[in-house]
Amino acid sequence: MMQSNIKSSSKTSWELINDGDMMFFQFKSDNRLMFYSTKCTEKRFLERFKPILLKQIHSDIIINVDKDSARIGDGLLTQRSNLALGVRIADCLPVYLFNETKICIIHCGWQGIIKGIAKRAKRFMDNYKYVLGASIGPCCYEVKEDTAELFTQQYKNAVIRRNRKYFIDLKGAIIEDLGEEKLIASLDFCTKCHPEYFYSYRRGDKNKRDYAILKYFSTHPDS
């Protein structure tokens, strides 16, 4: 298995994994593994990791799969090992949270962020750390003025104005919610700017999705 470091964060880097006929991004933290698919191997990626997935509705709903069989919402939580939790991504931001006993993955579009999905995840996860996946960046995420105003009210650093247009920094908003000191890595690619890796709704991939997966192993995955 060939690995090449992607210097995607001032903290710790994700890796681009080429494993036979499959390519994906991976980040390790002890016995937690985070994955982000690439567009060329979507089907094989899902077949390999077999994640629990949701019908996503841009909400603040986080489902504890250990207690609840519902699968409508925008976040998943478990204390069980060897269980893969996943979300579909179409330019939105996946956030991977974990502590000593739990893992949680959330799908963060602008609506979910305003509704408080990251704040809700924070309440579920004591002494957590978190990792950010790829998403559309403030270079490309233009929004209407009314959406920008919602962010201005809650997130002082997440709205950028250029040439009388408004752009949103999804990662900036999440960092305000979850704390920069708890962030350990970010896959700093704009999904719209990098068609070599990702699908992008804003670029025209209306029916295609990227996938983010979080998995906890009872023992270290390399052992």
Image (spheres, rainbow, N blue to C red):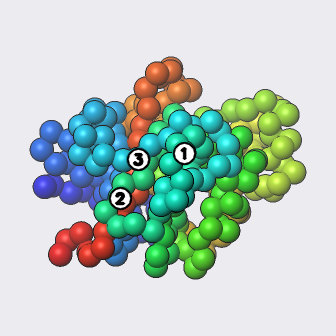
Q: Are marks 3 and 2 in contact (CB under 8 Å)?
A: yes
Quadrant including the C terminus: bottom left
10 Å neighbourhood of mark 1: few (<14), some, or many (≥20)? few
Q: Position of residue 19 (x, y in %)?
A: 16, 48
| Residue pointed to by mark 1 | 70
Three-letter code, disc 2 = Leu
Residue 52 is labelled as 3
Would residue 124 appear left or right of 45 to someone viewing this image? Answer: right
The CA span between labels 3 and 2 is 8 Å
Nearer the observer, 168 or 48: 48
10 Å neighbourhood of mark 2: few (<14), some, or many (≥20)? some
Q: Which one is closest to the eye, mark 1 or mark 2?
A: 1
Three-letter code, disc 3 = Ile
Residue 96 in sight in this render: no
Would residue 173 appear left or right of 21 to someone viewing this image? Answer: right
From this view, report whether residue 58 is shown above or below residue 175.
above
